[in-house]
Amino acid sequence: MTTRSASPGPTRRAFLRQGLGLAAATGMGSLLAACGSDDDDNATTTEDGPVTITMWHGQEDQAKETIDKIVVDFQSKNPKIKVEASSGGVVADSMLQKITTALSAGSYPDIAYIFGSDIANVARSPKVANLQPYVTKPEMKWDDFYPAARDAVTVEGKVRGFPALVDNLCVAYNKKVFKAAGVPEPTAGWTWDQFIETARKLTDPGKGVFGTGWPADGGEDCVWRFYPMIWDLGGAIVDESGKKVGFDNDSGLKALQTIHQLGAEKLVYPDTKPGSETMYQIFNSGKMGMVATGPWQLPDFVDQKTDYGVVPLPSYSGNKVTIAGPDTWTVFDNGSGRVKGAVTFLQFLTESSQDVKWATQAGSLPLRQSTANSAEWKEHLQSTTGLDVFSEALGYAKIRPTIRTYPRLSQPLGQAIVKMLLNKGTPEGALREAAQAANDALATG
Amino acid sequence: MRRLSEAGTAWAYVFPACLIILGLGILPMIWSFILSLQVSDLITPPEWIGFKNYEVISRDPHFRAAVGHTLVYTALFVPLVIAAGLGLALLLNRRIRLIGLYRTLVFVPFVVSATAQGVLFSFIFESHFGLANAVLRWFSIPPQGFFTDEHQALYLLVLIGLWSGVGFCVVVFLAALQDIQEELVEAAALDGAGRWATFRYVVWPALQPVTIFLLVWQTLQALQVFDLVFVTTRGGPLESTTVVVFFVWQQAFQQFNAGYAAAAAYVLAFVLLVLSIGVRFARRRDT
């Protein structure tokens, strides 16, 4: 998901798009041939001997600096494990393409930054390491990771990497817009009916003010906002058999009806452009009252001097519900010595003392519960408005299933949501089509 | 003996180039053809399925839609870009003040990357806060959905494509226009030919070879359009702008159907090949 990386900027996006465009223009074949030619298999893989591990972190700016510092720190304490950390030549958004080609070329790093929604597919490769034997060791303090973070790196019962980043969805609101419309600010425990009612009061076509916004490009950022709604209504993304969707019922229908109401009454700004930057610009410029978003967006609000507040997502039932979109440090098998080295490094990287640096400096949330309880993090919470709401939501956030058919399920669902946002067709029809297409994808595997 | 060593030297010179062409052109083509006969996600070992991918693709409504969008784009883009290019070239083919500046300005959009264009135009055609709707409002025309309207998005892409593509046509036509001998034009004038007759019987025949070149070139470009779609619409809204290359990207890198994507890419490649060969034959018959 594009919006989840630490600092989305137009230049990086532009670069990425151009790169992809070029790749497609020259044909997939040449792309595959061109990548993965760097051969750095020079490390010896004897147990406990000196070992060199490669990491593609896909980070830039602040996040990259933080990682670099942690690597230097690690190096001074573990001289036998040499860590070669680089972005991997790509940003996190295009790591999947890079790693796919690297795997098929047979020359891949030891650690790569893989989005949670992709790990199930990547983990099908026999070249992805199984970390199950390592994580059960008590010094790993595996249970200290938030459940959402642990689930994100577990595919079919096997741990395939370490949690890298975790975030979740809450609602940010623009206080100025609320004041101008004379609407009371939302509070925790509110319902979707209240959300729609509030959006209705805030919307003012004459002034070009929207109640809320929703990405409408049909991508992951559009789709994942839908899941907390169906979970709250007793639905699921896939049912227990794993062969059918779990929202082809009242839960999916009601959730789509809610979105349809927003779309039909034009209470929502549907952002059809990839990246949803416009949506946040509109929010910052005081033309949008509320937007569901993650903690990654807070630094931008602060930069733009937006007077904002944060509340948990609304629900239907009054229960607390939200979705986490965790990313992973997936570990690849280049021999047991290197896997061991990678685990040692990742253990260090995610230890509370480093985790707090990563979370505070790179603008994300703690991966470990012990980090969240640390004095340093609590102090950091004071510095950014609303961060405490996101931090607390980690306790109850759930994740998307780590199944490999997920992308093929998400795609038709995205189209159904876009239809509702653009007020085309009925919720019933959209649900039927999406469920049909997603079920077909699940059935064929 | 000497001959042999001469040939050897020649091959030594040609060898690096051959290697590059083989390695970066031919081998990937063969490899992706093999890929198109498999079920492959590029991650797990592939499974051989023969021509089944092609069979499925012939019945795939999404692929058919992508082909449709690509054809509509091409059918609109190619004639328009050539007509506009010719018109502008004729206007710019005269000696007036600052002509160098005008020619440069026409060519500038061609140099701007498709990415930058995409970003620029998605701001202009933003449906609520964009410049285009502000202008329309000024003329009392109701605001348009533009990229949020599935009946407009594809045509907007043609428009953006024209903005950048026309510069190239202008340069090629200008070069051809300046190659026409002045004597011919003068002779026609002496014979009493008006402006239209001069164009029809002197200028146009001289422009025909480059027109055919542009026709082929722009058609190939239009059939492979991708970057513009990727930056502005990602195939949306509601899959109204999924073109063939975008479909390939989506299948390979979003849905992990690399084999299927390779088959789709090969269908496109085959069409391009037939087109190129067809034009070649047609031209050979002409001369």
Image (tube, rainbow, N blue to C red):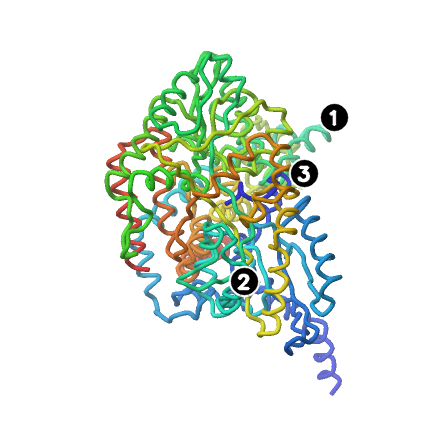
Query: In the displayed structure, does residue A229 sit left or right of residue B16?
Result: left
Residue A392 in percent (x, y) is at 50, 38
Label ID, residue B178: 3
From where the camera sits, is residue A426 visible? Answer: yes
In the rendered image, which quarter contains the C terminus of chain A? bottom left
Question: Which of these two is toward me, A290 or A42?
Answer: A290
What residue is drawn where x is 45% and y is 32%?
A312
Label ID, residue B56: none
**Labels 3 & 1 near each other (Cβ < 8 A):** no
As measured in the structure, the alpha-carbon distance from the residue carrying label 3 to the one carrying label 1 is 18 Å
Label ID, residue B98: 1
The chain holding disc 3 is B
Q: Residues within 10 Å of mark 1 (few under 14, many from 20)?
A: few
- Number of marks: 3
Which of the two discs, 3 and 1, labels the residue nearer the N terminus?
A: 1
**Element under label 3?**
helix
Residue A385 in percent (x, y) is at 58, 30
Between marks 2 and 3 in the image, the one whose residue lies nearer the viewer: 2
Residue A361 in percent (x, y) is at 66, 43
As measured in the structure, the alpha-carbon distance from the residue carrying label 2 to the one carrying label 1 is 51 Å
Instruction: Say which amino acid is labelled 2.
Output: Thr
A292, above or below A132, in the image: above
The chain holding disc 2 is A
Q: Which residue is mark 2?
A: A101
Q: Residues within 10 Å of mark 2 (few under 14, many from 20)?
A: many
Instruction: Say which amino acid is labelled 3.
Output: Gln
Instruction: Say which amino acid is labelled 1.
Output: Leu
**Element under label 2?**
helix
Question: Which of these two is toward me, A88 or B196?
Answer: A88
